[in-house]
Image (cartoon, grey):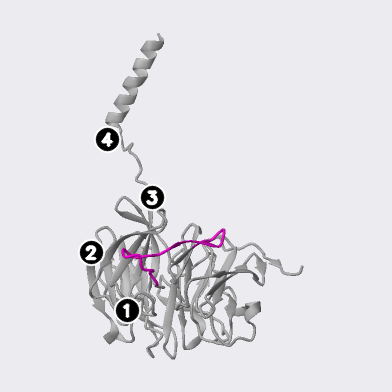
Amino acid sequence: MLRHIAVCIIALAVSLSLVGPALGVEAKEPLRRFLYVTVPDGAGGTKDHQGILVFDIDNGHKFVRKIHMKSVRMTRGVCASAATDRLYISHSNGAVLCMDLRTDKELWNKPYIKMGGGCDRLVMHPNGKKVYIPSGYWSKDEHMKVVDGMTGELLKVIVVSPKGGCHDALCSIDGKRVYCGSTRYNTLTVIDTDKDEIVQRIGPFKGPIFPFTVNGAQTQCIVNTSRELVGFEIGDIRTGKKIGQVRVKSQIGQKRRCHGVGMTPDEKEIWLVDQDKKKLYVFDNTVSPPKEMQSIDVALKSHGWITFSIDGQYAWPDTGDVIDARTKKIVATLKDANGKRVVSSKFIEVQFRGKDAVQIGLQLGVGRVTAPEPKKKTKGK
């Protein structure tokens, strides 16, 4: 009897293995995570490559391959969409290149400089339909260009800053808003992505807008501003007002600006870049105002940039250091095929199943908690 049952079980298993694919029962492709680093960086760093250097996040950030792009000169920004399997690089101060993530093939490469201004740190809507391109921190052009993600056709221009300098941009996690800062204007501009119209300006801040970040619920922004502030300013997106300023205690009185600020995906910490001192400062963001906790030494004086892996496991500054975000220890260094350190502030995480991109990170270290933020503890109370 037992032997008969065993034979039946084996027969059933064999049968399922044969009909499984026909029924849609098949093994799920493993998730693979890669860091796409564009070079050369228009702000400095690695100069002896043109295109994208790819690193395996789950294999010690080992170098995987180089995607050569002879037309790419100074890269200014990179973004991508899992919905369309397309990646975009702004480069040469006035052009955007579109690449197929499945094949690594260039699809188009278009100049926009004659349309007004240049092309700085671009972003795109998660659905892949539209790319938003600031005109450049170096430009007097006041516009953000809105471009069709499939064809590259210019759809619209939006006046962001009356004096130009449109620099960094960020698309919210839900895709409903695009934020843009100007190096010649002291307010952060908010654009509705449905109508592509400005719906809010946040500030004024102490100085013009350099790197910034926004929490997932879009209630708070953290901004690098004045040349006199080693720290950051805080804006309330709900009211449109600046609500605070935080300084690094050891650097009070120093007259320079930090370039690089990020919020961990769980929004519990804010990381600040002090490129002059080769340090990152970590702040507790569960209290108000955020409280300085510790500093991390990095390898180089750099342009200044910080972002995080989607799951919050790693912190990536532009120095090529890979930091365990929990332990605050450097656990790897980005190196090319020749073992040379790779330095760039233009990079994103791309996750694949098979050949399909399934999730894309962001250039800026943004919060990913989309529910309304809980009330923070006020320091000293």
Left or right: 312 with respect to 100?
Answer: right
Q: Nearer the viewer, mark 1 or mark 2?
A: 1
Q: Position of residue 364 (x, y in %)?
A: 46, 70
Q: Position of residue 174 (x, y in %)?
A: 46, 63
Q: Which residue is mark 1?
A: 74
Query: Considering only order in the chain, which callout, 4 or 2, is on the residue closer to the N terminus?
Result: 4
Query: Considering only order in the chain, which callout, 1 or 3, is on the residue closer to the N terminus?
Result: 3
Q: Which residue is mark 2?
A: 105
Q: Which residue is mark 3?
A: 31
Identity, as a three-letter code, of the amino acid under mark 2: Lys
The residue tagged with tag 1: helix, strand or loop? loop
Distance of mark 2 from mark 4, alpha carbons?
A: 33 Å
Q: Position of residue 191 (x, y in %)?
A: 45, 75
Q: Residue 22: give its label.
A: 4
Which SS type dominates the magenta stretch? loop
Distance of mark 3 from mark 1, alpha carbons?
A: 31 Å
The residue tagged with tag 3: helix, strand or loop? strand
Distance of mark 4 from mark 1, alpha carbons?
A: 49 Å
Part of the protein shown in magenta: 323-343
Query: Considering only order in the chain, which callout, 4 or 3, is on the residue closer to the N terminus?
Result: 4
Question: Residue pushed farthest front?
Answer: 339
310 to 347, vertically: above or below: above
Question: Residue pushed farthest right?
Answer: 381
Residue occupying image coordinates x 41% and y 88%? 164
Quadrant for the C terminus in the image:
bottom right
Query: Considering only order in the chain, which callout, 1 or 4, is on the residue closer to the N terminus?
Result: 4
Q: Nearer the viewer, mark 2 or mark 4?
A: 2
Q: Position of residue 60 (x, y in %)?
A: 42, 56
